[in-house]
Image (tube, rainbow, N blue to C red):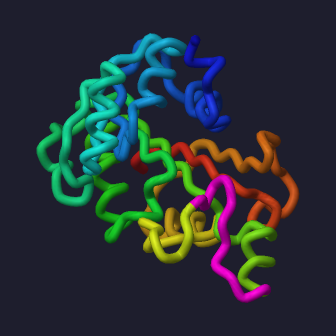
């Protein structure tokens, strides 16, 4: 079965559009390496994955991914400045302890950075909170008792964070149910995708 047929992450196609052909890519928190394999097929990329979790690391190896098992928050200093064309942090930023340090390191390592995250401000999440429950969804699949997420944020939070840290946003896509959201994205967007470069 081809990668495109088995693809379950609908954000991969947008990430692929942002990755230049034949780029060298570093995928942080690469899970089983599905995104890297997708980019190899679609954009003829090369590169590495970084994964801390033992099971996901083994899965990535079995999927023929060059994957390094290190902690993103303590191990990025091993990579040389501008050693990658694109550094990706896909649906992982919300599990970081020190978000600013991680993104600064990504911008040092790569010429371009792609960050994606679930929007905690999405109206369905707000509704679940109002009903007295922590939200769960396709983008937030974990129950409160087993979630790795420690820094959930909204689109407005991330915009303000980038402004404060002087991260330059060169593109942004907000999606819900595979469709682009243009009106009140902080309320109606379920997933946010950002492309960043150093100022």
Can you tell which quarter of the image residue 165 is in? bottom left
Q: Nearer the viewer, residue 112 or 73?
A: 73
- Tell me the residue at 68%/82% (across/down): 133
Residue 85 horizontal/vertical position (percent): 36, 28
Choose top left, top right, bottom left or bottom right for residue 179: top right
Residue drawn where x is 33% and y is 42% of the image: 56
As drawn, 137 above or below 32 = below
| Residue at 42% across, 40% down | 88
How many labels were placed on the picture? 0
User: Is residue 3 depicted above or below 119 in this figure?
Assistant: above
Main secondary structure of the magenta stretch: loop
- 31 or 96, nearer to the observer: 31
Q: Quadrant of the N terminus?
A: top right
**Left or right position of 146 against 54:** right
Q: Inspect the magenta stretch and tell me whether residue 135 lies in it.
A: yes
**Front in this rendered view, residue 57 or 92:** 57
Viewer-nearest residue: 46 or 55: 55
Residue 71 image-quadrant placement? bottom left
Residue extending farthest to the left is: 78
The residue sitting at 67% across, 53% down in the picture is: 138
> Which residues make up the magenta segment?
131-141
Residue 3 lies, in percent from the top left, at 56, 18
Compared with 172, 13 (above or below) is: above
**Residue 53 placement (x, y as % from top left):** 28, 50
x and y, in percent, of residue 41 in the image: 50, 12
Is residue 195 located in the magenta-colored stretch of the structure?
no
In the rendered view, would you say 123 is above or below 88?
A: below
- Residue found farthest to the right: 183
């Amino acid at each position: 079965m081809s990668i495109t047929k088995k693809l379950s992450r609908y954000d991969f196609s947008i990430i692929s559009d942002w990755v230049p052909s034949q780029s060298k890519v570093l995928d942080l928190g690469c899970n089983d390496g599905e995104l890297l394999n997708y980019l190899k097929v679609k954009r003829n990329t090369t590169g590495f994955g970084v994964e801390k979790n033992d099971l996901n690391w083994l899965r990535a190896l079995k999927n023929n991914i060059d994957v390094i098992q290190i902690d993103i928050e303590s191990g990025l200093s091993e990579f040389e400045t501008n050693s990658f064309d694109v550094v990706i942090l896909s649906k992982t930023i919300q599990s970081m302890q020190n978000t600013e340090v991680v993104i600064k390191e990504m911008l040092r390592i790569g010429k371009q950075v792609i960050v994606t995250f679930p929007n905690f401000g999405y109206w369905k999440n707000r509704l679940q909170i109002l009903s007295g429950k922590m939200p769960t969804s396709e983008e937030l699949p974990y129950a409160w008792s087993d979630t790795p997420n420690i820094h959930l944020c909204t689109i407005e939070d991330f915009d303000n964070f980038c402004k404060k840290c002087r991260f330059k946003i060169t593109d942004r896509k907000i999606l819900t149910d595979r469709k682009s959201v243009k009106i009140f994205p902080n309320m109606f967007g379920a997933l946010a995708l950002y492309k960043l470069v150093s100022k």
